[in-house]
Image (cartoon, coloured by chain):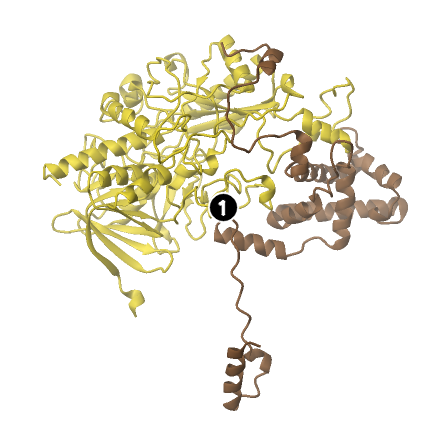
Chain colours: A brown, B yellow
Amino acid sequence: MKRRDTLKSIALGSLGMATVPSTDLVAAPPEKPLPIPGGRQKSEAIRDAKLMAEKFFTPHELKTITVLCDIILPADQKSGSASQAGVPAFIEFMAKDQPVHQTPLRGGLAWLDSESRKRFNKKFVELTKPQQIEIVDDIAYPEQAKPQYSQGVAFFNKMRDMTLTGFYTTRMGFDDLGYVGNTPNNWEGVPEEVLKQYGLSYE
Amino acid sequence: MSNFHIQETPEVFDVIIVGSGAGGGMAAYQLSKAGAKVCLLEAGGYYDPADPKYITQLKFPWESPRRGASTTRPFGDFDAAWGGWQLEGEPYSAAPGTEFHWFRSRMLGGRTNHWGRISLRFGPDDFRRGTLTGIGDDWPITYDDVAPYYDKVDKLIGIFGSKEGLRNEPDGHFLPAPKPRLHELMLKKAGKNLGIPVIPSRLSILTKKINDERGQCFYCSQCGRACQVYADFSSSSCLCKPAVKTGNTRLINGAMVREVLTDQKTGLCTGVSYVDTATLQERTVRGKIVVLAASSCESARLLLNSKSARFPNGLANSSGVIGKYLNDSTGASRSAFIPALMNRKRYNEDGVGGMHVYTPWWLDNKKLDFPRGYHIEYGGGMGMPMYGYGMGIHGMNGKYAYTDGKSLPSGGYGSRLKEDARRFYGAYVGMAGRGEPIPLESNYCEIDPNNVDKYGIPTLRFHYKWSENEVKQAQHMQDTFEEMIHEMGGIALGNKPGKEQNYGLEAPGKIIHEIGTVRMGSDPKKSALNSFMQGHDVKNLFVVDAAPFVTQGDKNVTWTILAMSMRTSDYIIDQVKQKNL
């Protein structure tokens, strides 16, 4: 308790107001001023901080998302996996930021567990890798999937979209892609060998 | 209760300017340089793209938790514009069966902080379309009246481009244009084969240093984020700040103007009243001349809300024309995949913000079934991935074979998706038409009888419908896009929008080029302002945004706002010297 608050509490107590629970007499700690990141407006910073303090997915749902993300974008010789790039946390944030994603994602995860139970009597994350892939193969190819899996296809398309976007907007994704911009530069035209490759010129 | 006391600034300013965008910034700059004591009122906050507090330029997508998605800003987290089509507590409405989307930026410099810097002069024909075609109206002035001011704006602010000698696309004083990027060279070649001109764009970006206050472009392609070395034109960076620096301009941020005050005896403006948005206190500021530059619809709203016994229809509105002839550019777009650009070599091709080439209007409307032209803006290249990158890959990855010649079914998962992200990167182009509409009296904004904003200021109600002229123009745009795409060896994406979708014609207000609501003209019965954008009814009232403009050409009016505001400022200086004001 800060000295000022102690004094306040004593003062009030001395007035015979001891029936007030003492915790109410302690002033709330002064709110830390919200740091506003450069380029954000205060209202945006408040909104972002609030969203980040909230949780949408349950630990089980996040675990399922992580498994799916890494099936969609696994680590390979060229770059790391989706979860190594922080994609599950990105999907969690987007679900809070754009609530339109919430039901399709949560419902899609529930669909997936339901399908897993039907086939193997277990939740998706508890399946063996080949079992997981058996289900994924039924929903990962929109043009070949059987009609009874159409909702699963829609969910997997959404997961694929979110995973790709989440991965390729990170440093790991930039390096995988070979993006070299967003830095002070001097544009002097298309490199000579590229012009040659395409049979183009500046004349 | 001091809260209810209206606080009045004792000083009487020579000029009060409402709004700090292109028009207001130019007037503040020009008038304060001439020695006038100016009060510049801006409804939004202070903004300086060189201050780390505000910088979004050169940030990476992962510096935004939503990777730059447009959840809170319509053009994404890193876009410089504060505000958008909807502002908290500042509503507007549209009459049933009509539609208008009103984009507002509440900040120093207004919408100039994020615009495309496309800086096209009007040509001689653009001022007299009425006479030339029998539809619509002429301006009360000609190209020759404005040309000297376009020249001055070119030199003061800086613009790149190329001398082309096109009659209705007059050349200016251009800095060197950046070389086309790879997809732009392909567009140029396709255009050449089709007889569609593709020429260097004309953007207000400094490819060479023009003074010590502003730096040179360093090619990050992010003018939409506003430039920390002021290499692009924003009213805040290039006009408002220099105006304040003269010592003659007092800038007041957070000043939401409620009405223009008048002397009922003389019928002249005496100042404005405004709400201090931070404290919600009512304030007034006095001035000898009032210049409105609050944006087309906001200036009209302000005049319509400035009612008094002497001006029962709103200020300077004896003609009843204020609010009418509201018009936005037409817009339609299409994108395409260019197989030849798959698996392309990587290098930094960020370039300047936006396009390096464009297509000016090239046809004769006498031979077409719509009366006005459009230009085409192009996009594409190896841009920075942001929210949305890679989405929809299942619509593409089954259609095209991999480098080893093998094909795989659409969709899928695994390392192939990484290869997809890499092989399709930078292999798309986009094209967007921006056309001239016919301003109609029946397209207008008025004061909504039932609604006020959070400051208690009556809001606007819009009435806007496109006519057959604009729909046919959009149809022509779509045909042209497909010709260009086909000629480039590209594959148009999505379905071609047909008649039921108005050929992809964007809803009114979506292009953010609205003008026309406080019309200028030589006849006081049909216009609110004379040819110097001075009130017919109120001689010490001026409007210097795009509200006075009779038409907008297909020319993205910012450069014309700047030229016309400079012209009106010179007129004000001259009239004060002659003791007419």
Q: Amino acid at mark 1?
A: Gly
Q: Nearer the viewer, residue B579 or B509?
A: B579
The residue under the point 48% across, 38% down is: B225
Task: Give the quarter of the figure containing the C terminus of chain B.
Answer: top left
Q: Which residue is mark 1?
A: A39
The residue under the point 50% across, 86% down is: A11
Residue B137 shows up from this direction: no
- Residue B213 left/right relative to A182: left
Please state the total of marks drawn on the protein image. 1
Q: Nearer the viewer, residue A4 or A109?
A: A4
For disc 1, the neighbor class at 10 Å (few under 14, some 14 to 19, many from 20) is: many
Which quarter of the figure has residue A141?
A: top right
Q: Nearer the viewer, residue B280 or B109?
A: B109
| Vertical arrangement, residue A10 with respect to residue A58, above or below | below
Residue B391 location in percent, x, y?
A: 65, 34
Residue B459 shows up from this direction: yes
Which quarter of the figure has residue B411?
A: top right
| Vertical arrangement, residue B200 with respect to residue B507, above or below | above
The residue under the point 36% across, 52% down is: B254
Q: Residue reaching furthest left?
A: B579
> Mark 1, chain letter?
A
Q: Residue reaching furthest front?
A: B212
- Residue B17 left/right relative to B165: left
Task: Give the quarter of the figure containing the N terminus of chain B.
Answer: bottom left
Residue B494 location in percent, x, y?
A: 61, 26
Residue B496 location in percent, x, y?
A: 57, 23
Residue A200 location in percent, x, y?
A: 56, 11
| Vertical arrangement, residue B165 with respect to residue B556, above or below | above
- Residue B324 left/right relative to B576: right
